[in-house]
């Protein structure tokens, strides 16, 4: 019997209906997932439009957070394994606006993520060509600096896909040990969890997030983890979580984090 937790799923490619949500649950259940956290992107919501202010995000702020929250609260009454989550882009200088938005809703947990460096969506295929004009080492420096700022903001419960900067396979030329160590120490001081995600297996980089070295450091620093598929389609719900658990165990982890109303609970990875 499996004991999987999938704390990163998106409904955005379909309507905010119970029928669409249940498509994700069916697949997740078939793969042995016992808790499912839905985490729509905050930039999808008109109520959060002032957090991520760039032309790309403005075009996608078409949904209502009220509709999303209402659906998830209804789902929780039917499916006790469902958690109401959100994925929020960290934007330096927008901490108080973000805090006010999050306080308006009864989230079980909030993922913090970095997808933009300035106005550049570095992990978006639409902006892939921009990598050709960037110093990769500088991009990595900027990314991990921003991730550390996200940690110290204390806006979030979990940092999603911590080394997503590698998504297209671009690699820093310098050794990242010191960068990883500084980042892990910052996350540990901020008492956050990090996500171990299978999503990278479906991306050009072809590997899990985060790198095993990073995860080993996180374990050594006492940082808890969540596990996730980052599914945007029902068929990806719970996908490859067995590989996520193998990596987590290899790094030393024996427990995963569960959340209710932003309270973290440690649950054994054992069946």
Image (tube, rainbow, N blue to C red):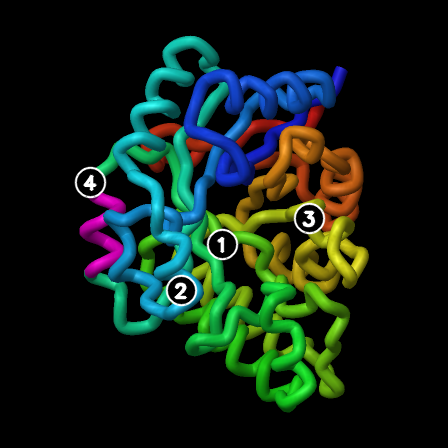
Q: Label 1: which residue?
A: 159
Viewer-side residue, 74 vs 147: 74
CA–CA distance in space, label 1 to label 4: 21 Å
CA–CA distance in space, label 2 to label 1: 8 Å
Lower sequence index among marks 2 and 1: 2
Q: Label 2: which residue?
A: 150
Q: Are marks 2 and 4 in contact (CB under 8 Å)?
A: no
Q: Is residue 10 above or below residue 267?
A: below
Image-based side of 150 in relation to 98, left or right: right
Q: Secondary structure at mark 3?
A: helix
Q: Label 4: which residue?
A: 104
Viewer-side residue, 261 vs 135: 135
Q: Are marks 2 and 1 in contact (CB under 8 Å)?
A: yes
Q: Secondary structure at mark 2?
A: helix
- The magenta-colored residue range is 97-104
CA–CA distance in space, label 3 to label 2: 21 Å
Is the residue marked by circle 3 packed among few (<14), some (14-19), or many (20+) residues within 10 Å? many
Residue 182 seen in the current view: yes
> Which is closer to the viewer, label 2 or label 4?
4
Is the residue marked by circle 4 packed among few (<14), some (14-19), or many (20+) residues within 10 Å? few
Kindly identify the residue that appears in the image at 74 percent across and 56 percent down: 203
Image coordinates of residue 98 in percent, x first then y, are: 26, 56
Is the residue marked by circle 1 packed among few (<14), some (14-19), or many (20+) residues within 10 Å? many
């Amino acid at each position: 019997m499996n004991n999987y937790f999938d704390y990163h799923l998106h409904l955005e490619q379909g309507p905010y209906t119970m029928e669409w949500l249940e498509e994700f649950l069916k697949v997740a259940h078939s793969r042995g997932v016992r808790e499912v956290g839905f985490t729509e992107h905050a930039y999808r919501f008109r109520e959060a439009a002032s957090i991520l202010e760039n032309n790309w995000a403005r075009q996608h702020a078409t949904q209502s957070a009220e509709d999303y929250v209402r659906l998830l609260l209804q789902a929780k009454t039917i499916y006790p394994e469902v958690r109401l989550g959100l994925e929020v882009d960290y934007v330096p200088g927008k901490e108080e606006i973000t805090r006010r938005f999050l306080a308006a809703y009864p989230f079980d947990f909030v993922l913090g993520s970095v997808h933009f460096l300035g106005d550049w969506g570095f992990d978006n295929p639409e902006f892939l060509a921009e990598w050709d004009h960037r110093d990769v080492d500088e991009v990595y420096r900027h990314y991990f600096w921003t991730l550390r700022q996200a940690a110290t903001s204390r806006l979030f419960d979990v940092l999603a896909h911590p080394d997503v900067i590698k998504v297209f396979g671009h690699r820093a030329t310098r050794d990242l040990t010191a960068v990883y160590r500084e980042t892990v120490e910052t996350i540990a001081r901020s008492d956050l969890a990090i996500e171990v995600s299978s999503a990278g297996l479906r991306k050009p980089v072809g590997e899990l997030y985060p790198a095993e070295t990073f995860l080993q450091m996180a374990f050594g620093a006492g940082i808890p983890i969540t596990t996730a598929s980052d599914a945007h389609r029902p068929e990806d719900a719970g996908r490859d979580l067995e590989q996520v658990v193998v990596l987590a165990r290899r790094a030393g982890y024996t427990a995963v984090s569960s959340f209710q109303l932003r309270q973290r609970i440690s649950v054994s990875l054992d069946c």
